[in-house]
Image (cartoon, rainbow, N blue to C red):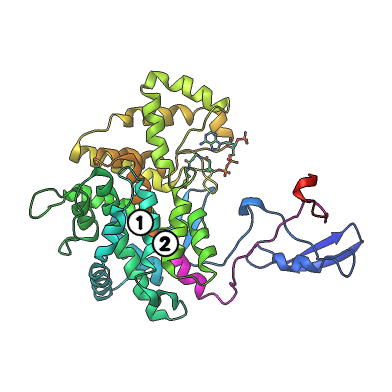
Amino acid sequence: MAKDSLTITDNRTGKTYELPVTHGTIRALDLRQIKVEDDDFGLMAYDPAFVNTASCKSRITFIDGERGILRYRGYPIEELAERSSFLETAYLLIHGELPTRSELEMFTHNITYHTMVHENIRKFIDGFRYDAHPMGILTSTVAALATYYPDAKNVSDPDSRRTQMYRVIAKMPTLAAYAYRHRRGLPAIQPDNDLSFTGNFLSMLFRMAEPRYTPNPAIERVLDVLFILHADHEQNCSANAMRSVGSSQVDPYSATAAACAALYGPLHGGANEAVVRMLNKIGHVRNIPEFIEDVKADRGRLMGFGHRVYKNYDPRAKVIKRLAYEVFDAVGKNPLIDIALELERIALQDDYFVERKLYPNVDFYSGIIYQAMGLPMDVFPVLFAIGRSAGWLAQWEEMLGDSEQRIARPRQIYLGAERREYVAISER
Ligand code: ACO
């Protein structure tokens, strides 16, 4: 009769241990009983970059990287992209169920009610250099929001948590648009609460002298779907930052700022920007073979390809590739699409990429769409952050409600110097 356990023999001592296996996992702490001497610390698992370590139990997002499956709360990403809206998806991520009509109306009302930011925040943004990267501005101003809402530190109060979640989701687009307009030397546009979440964001980005901005419905829908596709991705680098920083019970604005900082990196949310830079550098389809040879010779990466979890086509990339044409129909084609398509075609036939299971990820086509919408490259990670804020908050809420979670504090293998005497500077 098969047993849900693992038997380990420690060859250093000849002792045998039986560890329970639950959900295909052993508890790392169960290893600590494995010792050579009684006063040993006990065995640990070494797992740099958490490649094979589950840091939590979660009910939010499911990914099967081998089969290219992504589901939020059980719903396939393709169906949500087709039928849901970003705010409905945000509700789903946070509450675990799709809202009824009245629940969605109330949620939408609550988000809309919080879209404005304190006037001081706008002045704070004015203090950034004229060419400050919008992601740097967003990260800093989200952190600054904590100083406006001291009640946010009551992280054990569910009502306070709920209010802060509305505020974060509502204010991210406002801060993002202010950051963009600061960079362009344009005046900040106040939220228009008669527009949809995404329509209002487009208004705050693009409104000029007209008294009222009317978003292009195709662009509004595509951007809303892009927010859905970016809304969560289980324990990715920025969600892990959100949980890890949030585990100290700091307020959610500070934790969200940490998540934004993680997202800023070129290996995470900065990759869409890097893809467009790469495509511009390639410049023409005829230069692709030479570029591919450079990548294979380790002289650079094919940005927008590869993923820690997906060893198959990223399901989000499939949806985004289709959305690209909807955007091109509305605002004209981005010529970089031809280079991207050819790059993908060649890479997917090349042994180097096939053997390593490197496929396009979410960032491969998203930057091309954003650029066609008239957005500069350094705004791309900011757009990612707007969508992902829903997932960060859902992960944060789940973490705080999980009795098994404590302050995140990994162990290390110390390989540094043994104890030594301090030497005075004159004697070194
Ligand atoms: N181009 C060329 N080679 C690659 C690429 C790439 N984009 N990605 C991975 N490889 C190669 C590595 O060189 C390595 O080869 P080796 O075994 O011969 O040394 C092998 O594939 C495994 O790569 P790792 O770096 O070990 O994979 P890891 O899981 O650590 O990295 C990552 C995943 C960071 C996404 C990586 O694939 C990458 O750098 N991609 C480009 C950046 C990018 O698109 N990031 C966006 C990720 S999605 C997101 O965050 C939203």
Residue at the location (54% across, 69% down)? 247
Q: Are circles 2 and 1 on residues that touch, CB within 8 Å?
A: yes
Is residue 407 visible to the viewer in this orientation of the structure? yes
Per the rendering, the mark at residue 387 is 1
Residue 125 to residue 151: above or below: above
Within 10 Å of the Cα at label 1, are there few (<14), some (14-19), or many (20+) other Cα atoms? many
Q: Secondary structure at mark 2?
A: helix
Look at the numbered disc 1 and give the secondary structure of its residue: helix
The residue depicted at 15 percent of the width and 50 percent of the height is: 207
x and y, in percent, of residue 403 in the image: 57, 77
Residue 141 pos. (x, y %): 36, 59
Nearer to us in this view, 325 or 365: 365
Residue shown at 44% from the left, 64% from the top: 254
The amino acid at mark 1 is: Gly
Q: Is residue 384 left or right of residue 186?
A: right
Quadrant of the drawing holding the N terminus: bottom right
* Mark 2 beta carbon near ligand 1 (under 8 Å): no
